[in-house]
Image: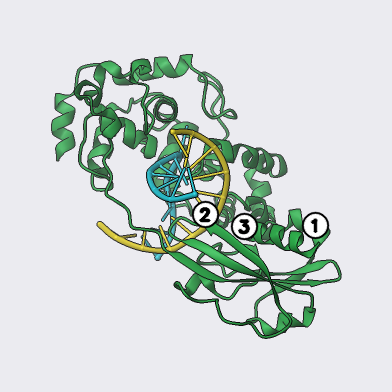
Chain colours: A green, B yellow, C cyan
DNA sequence: TATCCGTGGGC
DNA sequence: TGCCCAAGGAT
């Protein structure tokens, strides 16, 4: 494997001490996390923030983390909460299966009498994959787990000049990361690697002149830092089309609850015509009944773009013309509390502007 | 292994 | 504006 050869060839530069010295001296990129030397952080807060941070920026997570920890200060509070309220509180953060797994995980941890303290046992909990289990084990319990996220992948690919493209290079990167993970302060080391990737060893225009690991970086020495890690090209993103329905009665609008699995699973929503299962060209024919068009809602998802035609109607009985779904009339004055995913929040905003 | 799953910021 | 990307996990 490439990593073992590269590892042996790497400089004798003391990577972990240099990185930890840098970490001790610079500001944390997670405002809510305690500085080095503080008492061990609450596993609940570490777990919650790490789940929120999956594929999500620190800036986006901050307000959600504050709201969640204020409303549910302990994991027992979260485990006892109504799942629908947690889903609504998660609205806007994306990847909603995380919220469902959050509830399941909280209840399992309470059933166990507390968080498992090892990476292997944490890995068994719902929503904890290789990264999150290692991160919680290292940060909350001090285990010398090998923590690899996208930041670490980038830093290590550059440090060891691993030129094979992702995702194929992952095993080599993981092995290389293991060789530089220290037996103590593994949590600080992991957070330092991620802070370094977020602020210095960035995707574009890395600030190599400011890097505490510059003397050990093979990619910098070769002048190829910005080109790493290489990635396999991604597929083009298709566009799907459909309709979304706004049915109003006495100051309330009809909401449904989406199926637990699939797009926006388990979330409160406006009824739609099944765009989630359709390809291009659907949703363009006439609709029976007293509907009028309220414009188009455009929204980009990870693997497709969506164009929804907003259909407005104030005949409440038209609810029965839609596919049978669990639903409710929701007061418009409480729209902000509905917990709608962004695409439906956009549709609601458009509907209210068209209505007036 | 490849695909599905949200959203907002940066350039 | 369009594209890339992010403290990934489940299947």
> Answer yes or no: do the residues labelled 3 and 2 have beta carbons within 8 Å?
no
Residue A231 percent coordinates (x, y): 28, 45
Taking A165 as reference, is A283 left or right? Answer: right
Looking at the image, residue A77 lies above or below residue A312: above
Front-lying residue, A105 or A86: A86
Q: Which residue is at a point 59% across and 50% down the rendered structure image?
A: A110
Front-lying residue, A323 or A21: A323
Q: CA distance from mark 3 to mark 1?
A: 15 Å
Residue A237 percent coordinates (x, y): 40, 59
Q: CA distance from mark 3 to mark 2?
A: 10 Å
Return the chain for callout 2.
A
**Dot 2 surroundings within 10 Å: few (below 14), some, or many (20 or more)?**
some
Name the secondary structure under disc 1: helix
Residue A283 percent coordinates (x, y): 55, 76
> Do the residues at discs 3 and 2 belong to one chain?
yes
Residue A67 percent coordinates (x, y): 68, 41
Is tag 3's residue or tag 1's residue first in the polypeptide sequence? 1
Q: Which residue is at a point 36% across and 26% down the rendered structure image?
A: A206
> Do the residues at discs 1 and 2 belong to one chain?
yes
Residue bearing mark 1: A334
**Dot 1 surroundings within 10 Å: few (below 14), some, or many (20 or more)?**
few
Looking at the image, residue A322 lies above or below residue A121: below
Q: Quadrant of the N terminus of chain A?
A: top left
> Do the residues at discs 3 and 1 belong to one chain?
yes
> Is residue A43 something one can see in this rendering?
no
The numbered dot on residue A341 is 3
Residue bearing mark 2: A95
Q: Which image quadrant is residue A10 in?
A: top left
Q: Which image quadrant is residue A96 in?
A: bottom right
Looking at the image, residue C7 lies above or below residue A100: above
């Amino acid at each position: 494997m490439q990593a073992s050869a590269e590892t042996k060839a790497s400089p004798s530069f003391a990577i972990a001490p240099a990185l930890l010295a840098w970490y001790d001296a610079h500001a944390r990129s997670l405002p809510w996390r305690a500085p080095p030397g503080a008492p061990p952080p609450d596993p609940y807060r570490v777990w919650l923030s790490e789940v929120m941070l999956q594929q999500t920026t620190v800036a986006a997570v901050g307000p959600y983390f504050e709201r969640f920890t204020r409303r549910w200060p302990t994991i027992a509070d979260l485990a006892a909460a109504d799942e629908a309220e947690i889903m609504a509180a998660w609205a806007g953060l994306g990847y909603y299966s995380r919220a469902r797994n959050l509830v399941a995980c909280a209840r399992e941890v309470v059933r166990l009498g507390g968080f498992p303290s090892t990476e292997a046992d944490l890995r068994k909990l719902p929503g904890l994959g290789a990264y999150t289990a290692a991160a919680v084990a290292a940060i909350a319990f001090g285990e010398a787990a090998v923590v690899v996220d996208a930041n670490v992948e980038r830093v290590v690919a550059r440090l060891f000049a691993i030129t094979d493209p992702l995702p194929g290079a992952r095993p080599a990167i993981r092995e290389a990361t293991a060789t530089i993970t220290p037996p103590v302060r593994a949590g600080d080391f992991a957070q330092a690697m991620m802070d370094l990737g977020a602020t210095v060893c960035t995707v574009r225009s890395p600030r190599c002149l400011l890097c505490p690991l510059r003397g050990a970086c093979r990619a910098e020495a070769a002048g190829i830092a910005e080109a790493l890690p290489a990635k396999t090209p991604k597929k083009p993103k298709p566009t799907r089309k459909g309709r979304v329905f706004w049915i109003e009665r006495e100051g309330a609008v009809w909401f449904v609850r989406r199926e637990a699995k699939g797009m926006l699973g388990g979330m409160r929503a406006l009824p739609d015509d099944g765009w989630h299962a359709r390809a291009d060209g659907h949703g363009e024919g006439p609709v029976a009944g007293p509907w009028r068009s309220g414009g188009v809602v455009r929204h980009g998802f990870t693997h497709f773009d969506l164009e929804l035609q907003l259909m407005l109607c104030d005949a409440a009985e038209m609810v029965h013309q839609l596919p049978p779904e669990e639903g409710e009339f929701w007061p418009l004055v409480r729209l902000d509390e509905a917990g709608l995913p962004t695409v439906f929040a956009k549709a609601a905003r458009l509907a209210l502007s068209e209505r007036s």
